[in-house]
Image: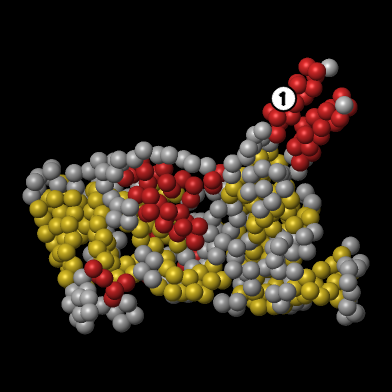
Amino acid sequence: MHRFFVLIFLSLTLFPLCLSAQKCRIIDADSVVVEDKSALTVTDYTLHELYHYPVLDANLSIENISGHAITASCVYTISRIDNGEIQICFPGTCEEAFSIGTYTKETTTILKNLEAQLLQAEWMPDTYGECIVTYQYTFIDNETSEQESITFTVTYSYSDSSAILSIHNLSCPSPANPTIIERYDALGRRITTPTKGLNIVKYSDGRVQKIINP
Amino acid sequence: MRYFRVLMLILILFVTGCNDIEEGKRYNTVDVIVNRRVLIEDFTGQRCTNCPNATNALSFISEQFGDSNIVIVAIHSGPFAHEKASFTSNRLPLCTEEGDNQFLRWFEWNSSQPIIKINRGEELSDTAEYLSAVANAISYPTQFQLGINTTYSDNESNINVAIWAYNSTDISAKLEVWLTEDSITDYQYMPDASLDTAYVHNHIYRKSLTKELTGDDISLLAYDTTKVSYELNLEENWIIPHLSIVAFAREKSSGEVLQVIKQSISQLLTTP
């Protein structure tokens, strides 16, 4: 009986501590987690559905897995931008940046537990070129005040070898919607699970994306 | 041993007994005395995915303080009211050149949106700060009074607007009179980044009846009433029952809004 109570006590007290190990995670359209200090490359583009200019987007979302509400903030550094503009609409407000520099978003967003939101961080080039942005997202647990940051760098590269994915539908994949309906390997054979190398993924919203699995 | 079990039970209840109440469901009470009406200029854009959040926050504030006490004007302007920030000439349907001039009067072109100005004073980007700022502005006393009388007959191509201003002390002020339009169905990018092609836009800035940006000078003697009149030719694309006149006076040197008033044209139309 004594052991039973001790077990319950320890599980109830230690479980929240386990949950607090990670506050948030950044995930791509396939729910693959973007690790801290990782580097991503975006080469494919979509055409804006209304205005028809190219848009390069890593299609990333932020997901709160802290067990509590968290407050998210963002600082981003543009280390190279050959042309065009970076647009970023999370957290809080939308803003655009045209030149090299470090920018702090003035607003924050509160994410409820298990809530996910698109980062909406895109490069909209005017012509071929490259843009490199390092994003740092900081999360503060509203319950415990614990703080955590994730930093990653995205290299957007727009060239004559860039492939058009589709007409840009800003309603890009989020963790819940839409879903992957078909997947093909580099030879065009239908596959049921991700394989090493180039995979072509078709989503329920009609979008098609190339993914290279290491 | 019995004491140990009791202690364990108390500790378990202590650990599990805390009930998280989400922030949106917590009740916040604010005691506010309404001493004036408040002008809120919402610098917004159809390409701005976060702007509907500001619209919703302002609608909530309007409900809390009363529609007649909160005068909202949605000024489609700035980078997110254009196809692309660098395409300064490619305005989206609800954006006007006058609106852009208003935006550039206060902000750099690459400023974030949405952003609001309350009574031409405080600038806010964070929707969580709106309520307390409006509560503060609405409780600030003023002696300045405005009256409005718009005349319009069905099928006429123009409207006449008469504004009365009154103050208990001598004052030199600026008067601005604007036309706004409600219930415009047009597209809007939403917070989940989706495109809503049937979004209903309200309080849309259409045109200034007074001198653009600067307004018109009015000088008031203490306890005296000053009247000014304007005439406006209606454009074909405006839906007359959805139009309103917004008039506000601001202090000449500080620019602080002294009083604001709104009259809907639909109130003047003859009912069949």
Q: Nearer the viewer, residue A100 or B127?
A: B127
Q: Nearer the viewer, residue B169 or B61?
A: B61
Q: Amino acid at mark 1?
A: Ile
Q: Identify the secondary structure beneath mark 1.
A: helix
Residue A182 rendering spot, x and y as whole percentages: 81, 75
The picture quadrant where one finds residue B214 is bottom left
Image color mode: secondary structure
Residue B168 rendering spot, x and y as whole percentages: 13, 43
For the question of whether residue A54 can be seen, the reply is no
Q: Which residue: 67% across, 48% down?
A: A113
Residue B114 rendering spot, x and y as whole percentages: 48, 57
Q: Nearer the viewer, residue A13 or B146?
A: A13
Q: Is residue A192 left or right of residue B10?
A: right
Q: Which residue: 70% across, 66% down?
A: A177
- Residue A7 vertical placement versus A115 (above, below): above
Q: Is residue B225 left or right of residue A176?
A: left
Subunit under mark 1: B
Q: Is residue A156 left or right of residue B66?
A: right
Residue topped by disc 1: B10
- Residue B187 vertical placement versus A100 (above, below): below
- Residue B77 vertical placement versus A104 (above, below): below
Q: Residues within 10 Å of mark 1 (few under 14, many from 20)?
A: few
Q: Is residue A165 left or right of residue A4?
A: left
Residue B91 rendering spot, x and y as whole percentages: 45, 73
Q: Which residue: 65% across, 34% down?
A: B18
